[in-house]
Image: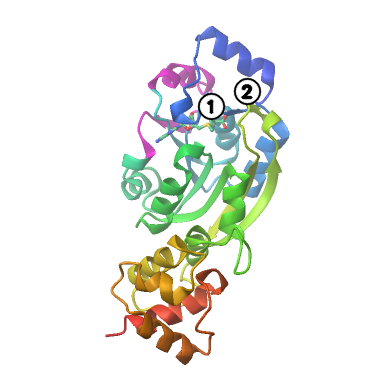
Amino acid sequence: MATLGIPQNTIEILQKYQFRFQKKFGQNFLIDTHVLERIVEASEITKDDCVLEIGPGIGTMTQYLAEAAGHVVAVEIDHNLIPILEETLSSYQNVTVLNEDILKVDIQELAQTYHDGKPLKVVANLPYYITTPIVMSLLEGDAPIKSITIMVQKEVADRMQEGPGSKEYGALSLAVQYYARPQIVANVPANCFMPRPAVGSAVIRLQLYETPPVMVKDEKKMFALIRAAFNQRRKTLSNALQNGGIGVTREEVTQALRMMGVSETIRGEALSLQQFAQLSDALFEK
Ligand code: SAM
């Protein structure tokens, strides 16, 4: 029975082990059973799934995941949490806890070891200080991943989901949308966590594509182009790219934009993923 989502039980176990929250690890533990149930429901886990949980904390969500999944591999960086996890997860035979930094874990090897190389489902209440590096390494890496259901800062969830014309639209939106279909499934207020974070949160589900929704000849060059465009987002695209260190001149950019039938004074924030792919192919085809 999952029991830790109840605040009193969380307080008791924290006191028993005299646990001290570490700010540097982004520790905000969930204390709301409705939110926990919503995350597990949105991740559509079945007994055929192997779940990778990033940052189990005291094992609150891990208990819910263990009840729904075939196996759960939980990667936790803070060694002070390991004895707590041993107690809170002792009745689950299908959980493996690894005391490691997720950014240093070979997830492909992990999928091989725990799920015969089949795709994993990632579920996490992420440490907010490294949300983007974690998400990007999951999306860009070679590990087989089916979906990623994560709690992130509300503002970051918005950035992942927005399209051209919105002020949240940027390099993260395009990177996420190249690899996955994002969908915000819940907004979560600060009082659902202990301690309370200073920001609002949201649960977002990223359903990974088998093939990207746009074709591009060199995706690395396209992402370098996108980064350059949004590094100076207030400038026109031709000015931003000319100074963007990607080896293209202003004239080359304006010519490519003309060819695409797009205004020469357009800013990067108005271009869709499809148009960035087109521009990248036009600029870097040689
Ligand atoms: N899943 C728990 C919950 O929902 O109550 C805890 C979530 S808390 C926001 C983030 C967790 O990630 C903490 O337990 C923290 O120690 C862990 N963490 C932080 N950085 C990490 C890293 N690089 N690798 C693995 N775990 C990390």
Q: Position of residue 202 (x, y in %)?
A: 64, 44
For mark 2, what is the residue? 4
Q: Is mark 1 within 8 Å of ligand 1?
A: yes
Q: Is mark 2 within 8 Å of ligand 1?
A: yes
Coloured how?
A: rainbow
Cα separation between marks 1 and 2? 8 Å
For mark 1, what is the residue? 59
Q: Is residue 62 visible?
A: yes
**SS at mark 1?**
loop
Q: Is residue 86 magenta?
A: yes
Taking depth in this image into account, of 138 and 156 the one nearest to the observer is 156
Q: Height in image: 254 above or below 90? A: below
**Amino acid type at image mark 1:** Gly
Mark 1 in CB contact with mark 2 (< 8 angstroms) = yes
Give the residue at x 63% y 46%: 154
Q: Position of residue 141 (x, y in %)?
A: 36, 56
Give the residue at x 39% y 72%: 241
Q: Quadrant of residue 256?
A: bottom left
Q: Position of residue 214 (x, y in %)?
A: 48, 76
- Which dot marks residue 85? none
Magenta range is 79-102
Q: Quadrant of residue 163?
A: bottom right
**SS at mark 2?**
loop
Taking depth in this image into account, of 73 and 201 the one nearest to the observer is 201
**Amino acid type at image mark 2:** Leu
